Image (cartoon, rainbow, N blue to C red):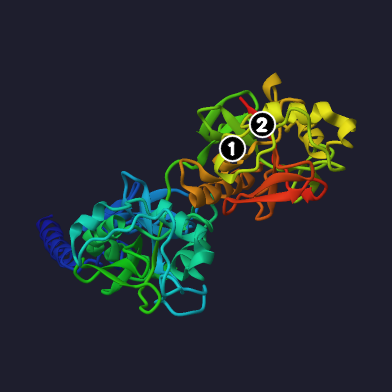
Amino acid sequence: MKMSLFVSLCCGVVFYSSAVQAACVQPPSCDELGFTADASKCEGSFLKCPWDLSKAACKEKEPETSMPILYGDGTVSKDIIPGKTPVGVVFDETNKLAVSLVNIKESHPLGSQEMEWATSSSCDVWGLVNCTYDYNDTTVDSCSTDGRLNTYQILANGSSCNGRPAASAVNRYKPTGCTHGLCGQNNWFLPSIKELSDIYKLKMQINASLALLSSFGAESLIDDYYWSSLERNNYEAWGLAMSDGERNYFDKNSQDHYVRAVVYYGEQKTAIPILYGDGTVSKNLISGKTPIGLVFDETNRLAMALTDVASDGSAADGAYVAWSNKNYDIPDLTNCKEESTLTTCSPDGRSNTDKILACGSGCGGTPAATAVNNYQPTGCTKDFCKKSKWFIPSMRDLVNICTLNSQMEISHMMLNNSLKFLRRNGINTSGISSLEYVSSNEESRGLVKTMLLHNRGMTNSYKTDGHMVRPVLAY
């Protein structure tokens, strides 16, 4: 009995000693057990390593940029989101502005990165304010601060400058992965000095974000001059150095600088108010309502049709319609001869069109007036926009269409950009042609007043010739 107890005690000691030895064996590491992630970067539910709580088995969060990213689908986030393509870095959340990931090239994707502002040695952009400040005067930041508006002006005056490489390059730009209209062509622009200054102030953060986006082709801002959309005079335009924020001006056509595009990513609106078929007016695209016109004269409550019109009154793009089938002086319709009085001579297009229609077959037929009288756009649900309500615009109306707040060339760009915006959203529109548009004013028995809307060129044309016709109505 004693011997048995002794053997049992000995065996117990041996067993205890073996257990202690087993407990001292080096355990597997966190990495060997699969706890390889940084626990602070985990998202969702996850397990931590029992002997090193900083390690975990989890899916790590995607890296976060220091500045918000604009994606090609129009969304904005600081996260690098799998499946989405970045197209810009947001530098002004208040005004919804983002800068492109890359420097813009003159002939995308080939060509030099640095380029001229204009190809003419003397090119004063009509309607663009001359910011005549001295070198490095920060007051220039308050001059023409809207880069979009400035770029419209430059593009509209391109022919007078023999070319505008910088503005044209950004206007053509469409980044890879852009699936939303806001980042497509015609929406990117040359920043103003203020906007370039805002980019410069955040250069460190922007470049840090661009570095994280390098796999998408993003390039850091270069410590050199970038062109702005501001001009100083006929010969010089403003630029800003990303090295130290210096403002300086340079010859437009003899010095090359870098170009970085900026885009507005906020609520998409037309530049000009939309008239809807139920009489509603808004710059917003309203779901469930059909646009029928663009308002060009809010004082007189006038809107132009979204398309030109054919001789049968149907919507058309590029149709030619004669004003009259023979030379005839319309009774009671004033002959408008002096260019200086064209905006006040018989300015009521509705009254003029009624007089032309009343002449009818006695005048040998009135194709243009008959066409607009038969026009009725799709989506018109109220009497104000049905047949017999549309008319040929007067010269006053045509001037207002192409001047819009006395900014002639901006109006042309704004009209066409608004029409393109609606077209991208499935609305039938036709752009403003560079050909002559007919008015409801006659010059004489054989001539009618016409206008080139893209440059406000007033002309006299034969009534029997074909012209572009854009109906107008009062709402």
Judge from the rendering whether residue 4 lies leftward or rightward of residue 359; answer left or right.
left
Please tell me whether residue 244 is drawn above or below residue 78 in the rendered image: below
Earlier along the polypeptide chain: callout 1 or callout 2? 2
Q: Is 107 above or below relative to 27?
A: below
Which residue carries the number 2 mark? Answer: 349
Distance Cα–Cα, label 1 vs label 2: 8 Å
Q: Nearer the viewer, residue 395 or 64?
A: 395
Q: Position of residue 329 (x, y in %)?
A: 79, 36
Say which quadrant the C terminus sits in: top right
* Label 1 packing within 10 angstroms: few (<14), some (14-19), many (20+): many
Q: Quadrant of the N terminus?
A: bottom left
How many marks on residues? 2
> Residue, x 64% and y 46% (percent of image)?
423
Observer-nearest residue: 68 or 438?
438
- Seen at 84% across and 38% down, the residue is 312
Q: Amino acid at mark 1?
A: Arg
Compared to 338, does 128 lie above or below?
below
Is 140 drawn above or below residue 405 in the view shown? Answer: below
Residue furthest to the top in view is 383
Q: Which label belongs to residue 396? A: 1
How many neighbours does mark 2 have within 10 angstroms: few (below 14), some (14-19), or many (20 or more)?
A: many
Residues under numbered marks 1 and 2 in contact, where contact means CB atoms less than 8 Å apart: yes
Q: Which mark is residue 310?
A: none
Kind of residue sitting beneath label 2 = Gly
